[in-house]
Amino acid sequence: SQTIHQWPATLVQPVGSPLSLECTVEGTSNPNLYWYRQAAGRGLQLLFYSVGIGQISSEVPQNLSASRPQDRQFILSSKKLLLSDSGFYLCAWSTSGNEQFFGPGTRLTVL
Amino acid sequence: GQSLEQPSEVTAVEGAIVQINCTYQTSGFYGLSWYQQHDGGAPTFLSYNALDGLEETGRFSSFLSRSDSYGYLLLQELQMKDSASYFCAVRDTGFQKLVFGTGTRLLVSP
């Protein structure tokens, strides 16, 4: 069966510090991978998606970046965090495009 | 671009039936999905409709009318554990990505 891992579960970082969030998927090959951010009580905002190794599409201009160094690994990064980067970050995978499976998420607080 | 509209909140009592509506405006359409998210948790997939009509999965059913750009999620025999946020989502034209609605918070009371 397929599983998706995200870490860390929670993170508190000062403004201006770097960020690296990692997501890995097991039990499937060549999945589509997605990074979302969710502000408290709000909907899901798609940040990046990837259909293959090294292929990244950015949805929203911001100080975040994503990379896919391996087929089942997706990394979200920032060189300098802003207060507005606080939120719940969710990684998801899909093979059909219609049904997505989400990881447990990382709750990021930037102080 | 794509936009989806859902009511922000719906309340109901245990054992009742509730319907959560979703209207969408899209340049293309591949199907309508529904997700459930409990507070503090990750969204989980509930259903997917590509064609018009009703899809039933246990206590949950989802309906789609492509001509009306409209769908709904029907929850029957409500339980306290159904209290959560529910999101509709449409697959974007030509890309394997979803656009999510703003979500409907369902509160089930005893």
Image: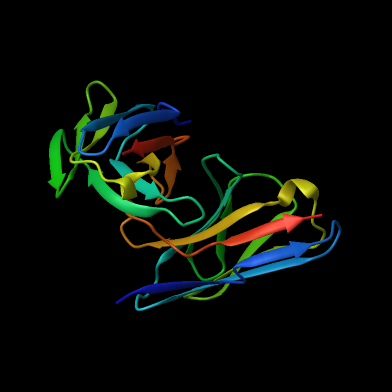
Q: Viewer-proximal residue, A107 or B52?
A: A107
Q: How is the image coloured?
A: rainbow
Residue A15 x, y percent position in the rendering: 85, 56
Residue name at image x 86 percent, y 58 percent: A16
In the rendered image, the residue lying farthest to the right is: A16
Figure quadrant of residue B104: top left
In the rendered image, the residue lying farthest to the top is: B68
- Quarter containing the N terminus of chain A: bottom left
Residue B26 appears in the rendering: no
Residue name at image x 80 percent, y 62 percent: A79
* Horizontal arrangement in the rendering, residue A68 relative to residue A51 (left or right): right
Is residue B20 depicted above or below B82 in this figure? above
* Horizontal arrangement in the rendering, residue A87 relative to residue B10 (left or right): right
Residue A34 x, y percent position in the rendering: 50, 58
Q: Viewer-proximal residue, A59 or A84?
A: A84
- Quarter containing the C terminus of chain A: bottom right
Residue B32 appears in the rendering: yes
* Horizontal arrangement in the rendering, residue B52 relative to residue A41 (left or right): left
* Horizontal arrangement in the rendering, residue B40 relative to residue A26 (left or right): right
Is residue B99 depicted above or below A19 in this figure? above
Is residue B53 depicted above or below A28 in this figure? above
Residue B90 x, y percent position in the rendering: 36, 39
Residue name at image x 21 percent, y 41 percent: B50
